[in-house]
Image: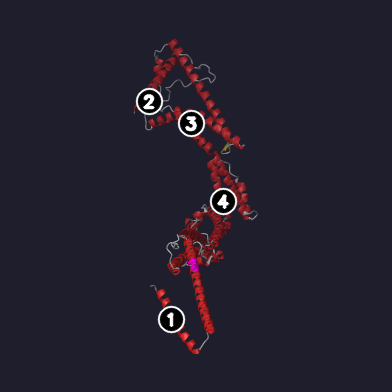
Amino acid sequence: MSNGQSLFLQMETACGSLLHELQILWDEIGESDADRDRMLLELEQECLEIYRRKVEWANTCRAQLKQSIADAEAELAAICSAMGERRLHTRQSDKNPGSLKAELGAVLPQIEELRKRKCDRKNQFTEVLKHIQSLKSEIYGSAENTSSDTVVDETDLSLRKLEELHRQLQSIHKEKSKRLKQVLDSMNSLNSVCSVLGLDFMQIVSEVHPSLGENEGSKDISSDTIEQLEVSIQRLRELKLQRMQRLQDLAASLLELWNLMDTPIEEQRIFQNATCNLVASENEITDPNMLSIEYINYVEAEVSRLKELKASKIKEIVLKKKSELEDICKKTHLIPESDSTMDITIDAIESRAVDPACVLEKIEREIAKVKEEALSRKEILERVEKWIAAREEENWLEEYNRDENRYNAGRGTHLNLKRAEKARVLVSKLPAMVDALASKTSAWQNERGVVFTYDETCLLSMLEEYTALRHEKELERKRQREQKKLQGQLQAEQEVLYGSKSSPMKNQSIKKGPGSSSGGPSNRSLSFNGAMLQTPNTPHNVKKNERVNRDNLREEGKLNIFISKFKNE
């Protein structure tokens, strides 16, 4: 028998005992049957009312349990859905019924476990979102920081969503590293420019953002800070370019003044850093304080001092420039300005009638003009020098050919012979050399529209004069060769008429004193118009001409022997 049946029997026994006791009491009291029936009916109704209330309470408990189970299952499903997991609990089937309390008891532990896991997952989301928001605040600034960015969406706590947040966090970390590197690079560039300009780097970066001027702690990497750094770098670079141009102008003035006044090297070395950067680019100027306002003022003071010194020594400088101009003109065979004009200019300087700087500038322009013209005349002058050297060799060769003792063995004879051979080769090139020089000179004159002068003489006139003189010499040599030819023919005719035997008169002429000439009669004359020799046709003269011819042949034989011997050596 079950516990419920036992309790029901016990209650039935107890109720029967009480009813029996109540019957005894009613008998003693003497209650009527109607009263007894009425009281039993009331008692039965009261019992029914109590049973009814208990049944209603039991129905209510059942409904509550079912609702609790449904709510638990709904919460279980919601948590599993939010966390992206499969549902773990399945409701008991009708074939295997169980109590509602047991079913609820089976669901609640799973709910508690999932609630704990959900709380942990939510904390992970919250931590990642806070980290993301912190990095965004560093990158984009606090103005863009909103509280909604840290609110966790509890409807999606899946691992997939958590991985997305982690990837977003990693991406923001990379962005932070990139921006931090950009900020550090900008600070290094700014530090380099400040070092060259002699400015306080810490003060400038602190004006951009206070965190940049601190040695410790994180640096602000917001977009506004990066933009302000770039603006500061650009502003300082423009200032650097301005100061660099100013320093280079001062350096150019220094070099010009040093050159004018022959400043000693020891004094120039003091400002060597400034002059070395005369043509340097922006990136090449990196020395600290090279473009500081103090250093520029220092160089500017030196330029001012040299300008004052230049003003006091302007006459000496003008004379020096005048000498330089004359030297250039002398080297390039140009006509310098007349001394009288320069003397008048110097007198005007001394009387302060003209500005010395204007005079010096005029001379410098003249020097520049002469240098430019000298550059254009360089090739022609080189050809002129070669032509003059060839003419000197030509003159030497003519003197050498007129020397009757040139083949006599003596000291330096072979050197003269060797020079003569080279001179003949060089002289043979003179016509082509003169033609090429004349062609170059004509082209130069046509291009510039001025006459090419050489020491105040027109070069083309010099060439024409030389060509005419050379032509006259050639005609003279040709005439002499024709005269020699006629002389030879005359001697041959005389030999045919009178023979080649010696006579006593020939021996007498040979025995004459040392004052007499052995090369032929002293009273012989030649006609420049090609006439016959005016020598009387006497036997004595015929014999004498034969002897001269033999002597000439003997001399030519000696010359050929000497030349062959020299070539063999």
Q: Which mark is residue 395?
A: 3
**SS at mark 1?**
helix
Q: Residues within 10 Å of mark 3 (few under 14, many from 20)?
A: some
Of labels 3 and 1, the one closer to you: 1
Q: Amino acid at mark 2?
A: Ile
Mark sitting on residue 319? 4
Q: How many marks?
A: 4
Say the numbered circle drawn on residue 14.
1
Q: First in sequence: mark 3 or mark 1?
A: 1
Mark 4, mark 3: which one is toward the viewer?
4
Q: Can you tell which mark lies on residue 563?
A: 2
Task: Give the spatial CA distance, label 3 vs label 1.
Answer: 176 Å
When the figure is inspected, residue 423 is found, relative to residue 152, above or below; the finding is above
User: Pointer 2: residues within 10 angstroms few (<14), some, or many (20+)?
Assistant: some
**Magenta region, main secondary structure:** helix
Identity of the residue drawn at 38% across and 23% down: 560
**Image coordinates for residue 477, horizontal then vertical, percent:** 50, 23
Q: Position of residue 470 (x, y in %)?
A: 53, 27
Front one among 280 and 429? 280
Highlighted magenta segment, given as a residue range: 66-71
